[in-house]
Image (cartoon, rainbow, N blue to C red):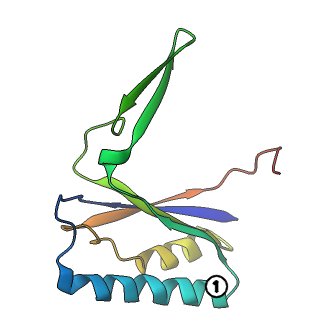
């Protein structure tokens, strides 16, 4: 079963303190290397700031395009991992290793099973 682990953290204009960046990179790199070596890493990406987000809504058959994220929240989606796990317990163990304070403050990891859709290119 593939699980998406969405990384939520508090976005700040200045980003993480410069002295913390090497440690953040090292922790993510270690996790990615371990997951890749075990053959369970499917995908991983970080996201740029929410200031660059665009939201598309469809209402009454018409598209409404707005700048920014859909909702105002204290924590923003910062990136994700997709890891192929045997079960939720294994997914939780991988999620515990993901650094969540990447953009200041604390953060959380939301884990969701990836749906197997009928069409996959």
Q: Give the image location of residue 79, x and y in percent.
A: 44, 62
Of residue 88 and residue 55, the one placed in the foreground of this image is 55
Quarter of the view holding residue 10: bottom left
Q: Residue furthest front?
A: 52
Q: Residue at x 60, y 84 (%)?
A: 35
Q: Give the image location of residue 41, x and y in percent.
A: 63, 76
Query: For the residue labelled by badge 1, is the local secondary structure a helix, a strand or a loop?
Result: helix
Q: Residue furthest top?
A: 60
Q: Tell me: 67 left or right of 117.
A: left
Q: Tell me: 10 left or right of 5.
A: left
| For residue 19, above or below residue 84 | below
Quarter of the view holding residue 90: bottom right
Q: Which residue is mark 1?
A: 36
| For residue 30, above or below residue 92 | below
Of residue 92 and residue 19, the one placed in the foreground of this image is 19
Q: Give the image location of residue 26, x and y in percent.
A: 39, 89
Total numbered labels: 1
Q: Residue at x 38, y 57 (%)?
A: 48
Q: Tell me: 17 left or right of 45.
A: left
Quarter of the N terminus within the rendering: bottom right
Q: Give the image location of residue 77, x and y in percent.
A: 38, 54
Q: Tell me: 85 left or right of 55.
A: right
Q: Residue at x 50, y 72 (%)?
A: 92
Judge the density around disc 1: few (<14), some (14-19), many (≥20) Cα neighbours within 10 Å.
some
């Amino acid at each position: 079963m593939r699980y998406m682990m969405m990384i939520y953290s508090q976005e700040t204009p200045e980003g993480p303190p410069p002295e913390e960046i090497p440690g953040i990179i090292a922790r993510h790199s270690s996790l990615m290397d371990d997951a890749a070596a075990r053959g369970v890493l499917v995908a991983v990406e970080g996201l740029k700031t929410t200031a660059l987000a665009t939201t598309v809504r469809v209402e009454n058959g018409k598209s409404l395009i707005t700048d920014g994220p859909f909702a105002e929240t204290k924590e923003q989606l910062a990136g994700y991992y997709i890891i192929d796990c045997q079960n939720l317990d294994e997914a939780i163990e991988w999620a515990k290793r993901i650094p969540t304070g990447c953009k200041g403050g604390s953060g959380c990891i939301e884990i969701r099973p990836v749906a197997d859709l009928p069409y996959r290119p």
